[in-house]
Image (cartoon, grey):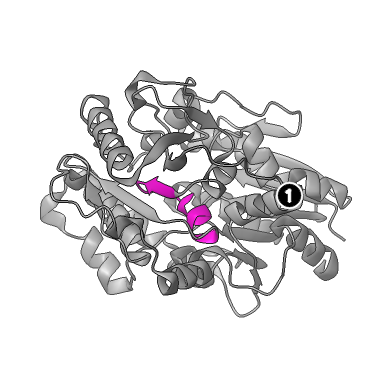
């Protein structure tokens, strides 16, 4: 019988994380719950420099600063523990999965919030990593290690397959982390974290105020003003405040003028904006209610945030943006393009706003939205249940 749920997380835990990871739901189902934050060891810069205004400081979260501490905590886990990984299997986390495998504990990996990506194969991955002429020796070694310690080869390194895959839309099963599974792994089809927030809105049954003016909502990302993911090794962000925000405000001016809307900002949880930031042109900026804001908006502006899920759920037109700086980064530029094309859109370059047919950007491709919903948000028949309640019930049933 499982009595304890242990979450492994690789970024500092926030109050928002505590809620969206279902801690209270597990507690309500009679489980003990704790979080192991391994970011101080795996990503020390992220742990030190993340700007968190809502860091969770409950007594059921433990931060680990050394490999020795992490290994010791794993060895102390009892047989009635179920582990949920909210972090990927890769070269720097191999030892965690390895020691857990030696204990033969049941565990699940989360593949819930995925985004459109290029299809991968061993040959394509190898070709990407082994363009040796472009790398220094240290980088070549790093790339080779990433291949060796990829999920598809984990079983050859003694890694126990997960007991469950926690899956969102149909595309989740094609994610590279799903290669950890074997025939005994149970695929638990759920939905994204965003869909849980949508369920909150449905259950709260909040009424949207009568519109005085039409609204557009910009989905904020932390960068370039606030550093978060860019503090993780291997991830960089080419955007600068000096270039990005003035061009963004010019875009807002154009949208307000041509589409007759008032732009508001849905602040990212990793950001800490004032109510009317100068860098957004003094526009109203709110944090913590992105779902509600998108629900009441007429059009949504997005760079590469997964919160576009709300726009798809509520059938709101999407405008995607890129920039000259973004185009200098292959991962950022291609990510924006893939997100946009998945719902039938082409990104607008905010550094070049001439000859834009704004009416084309104020339309919805219903077939594309329906496909995206199934592929990346929710594909199961679990109705309107919260995802972690489904997980808690399944753990009780199986273990």
Query: In the rendered view, does 253 fall on the left or right side of 9?
Result: left
- Residue 80 is one of the magenta-drawn residues: no
- Residue range corresponding to the magenta coloring: 299-313
The image quarter containing residue 397 is: bottom right
Measuring 53% from the left and 53% from the top, which residue is drawn there? Answer: 310
- Residue 308 is one of the magenta-drawn residues: yes
Q: Which of 47 and 326 is in front in this view?
A: 326
What kind of element bears circle 1?
A: loop
Dividing the image into 4 quarters, which one contains the C terminus? Answer: bottom right
Dividing the image into 4 quarters, which one contains the N terminus? Answer: bottom right
Can see residue 147?
yes
The image quarter containing residue 164 is: bottom right
Most distant residue in the bottom direction: 183
Q: Nearer the viewer, residue 97 or 102?
A: 97
Q: Mark 1 points at which residue?
A: 205
Measuring 45% from the left and 31% from the top, which residue is drawn there? Answer: 46
Query: In the rendered view, does 389 fall on the left or right side of 257?
Result: right
Most distant residue in the left direction: 133
- Looking at the picture, how far across and down is residue 153, in whole percent? 44, 68
- Looking at the picture, how far across and down is residue 356, in whole percent? 19, 51
Query: In the rendered view, does 41 fall on the left or right side of 209?
Result: left
């Amino acid at each position: 019988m499982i009595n304890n749920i242990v979450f492994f997380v690789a970024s500092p835990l926030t109050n928002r994380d505590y809620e969206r990871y279902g801690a209270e739901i597990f507690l309500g189902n009679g489980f003990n719950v704790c979080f192991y934050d391994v970011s101080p060891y795996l990503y020390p810069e992220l742990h030190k420099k993340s700007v968190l205004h809502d860091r969770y400081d409950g007594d059921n979260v433990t931060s680990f600063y050394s490999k020795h501490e992490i290994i010791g905590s794993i060895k102390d886990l009892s047989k009635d523990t179920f582990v949920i990984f909210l972090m990927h299997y890769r070269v720097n986390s191999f030892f965690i999965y390895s020691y857990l495998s030696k204990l033969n504990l049941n565990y699940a990996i989360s593949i819930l919030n995925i985004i459109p990506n290029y299809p991968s194969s061993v040959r394509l991955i190898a070709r990407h990593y082994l363009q040796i002429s472009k790398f220094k020796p240290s980088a070549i070694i790093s790339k080779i290690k990433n291949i060796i310690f990829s999920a598809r080869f984990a079983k050859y390194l003694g890694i126990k397959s997960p007991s469950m895959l926690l899956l969102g839309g149909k595309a989740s099963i094609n994610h590279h982390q799903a290669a950890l599974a074997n025939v005994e792994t149970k695929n638990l089809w759920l939905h994204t974290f965003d869909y849980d927030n949508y369920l909150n809105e449905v259950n709260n049954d909040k009424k949207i105020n009568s519109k005085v003016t039409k609204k557009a909502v910009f989905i904020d990302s932390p960068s370039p003003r606030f550093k978060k993911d860019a503090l993780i090794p291997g991830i960089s962000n080419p955007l600068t405040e000096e270039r990005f925000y003035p061009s963004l405000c010019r875009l807002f001016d154009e949208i307000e003028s041509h589409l007759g809307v008032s732009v508001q900002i849905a602040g990212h949880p990793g950001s800490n904006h004032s109510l009317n930031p100068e860098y957004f042109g003094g526009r109203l900026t709110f944090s913590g209610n992105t779902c509600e804001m998108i629900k009441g908006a007429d059009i949504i502006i997005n760079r590469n945030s997964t919160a576009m899920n709300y726009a798809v759920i509520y059938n709101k037109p999407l405008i995607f943006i890129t920039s000259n700086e973004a185009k200098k980064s292959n991962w950022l530029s291609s990510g924006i393009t893939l997100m946009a094309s998945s719902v039938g859109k082409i990104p607008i370059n905010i550094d070049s706003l001439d000859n834009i047919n704004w009416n084309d950007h104020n339309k919805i491709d219903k077939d594309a939205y329906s496909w995206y919903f199934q592929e990346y948000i929710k594909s199961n028949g679990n109705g309107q249940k919260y995802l972690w309640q489904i997980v808690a019930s399944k753990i009780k049933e199986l273990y």
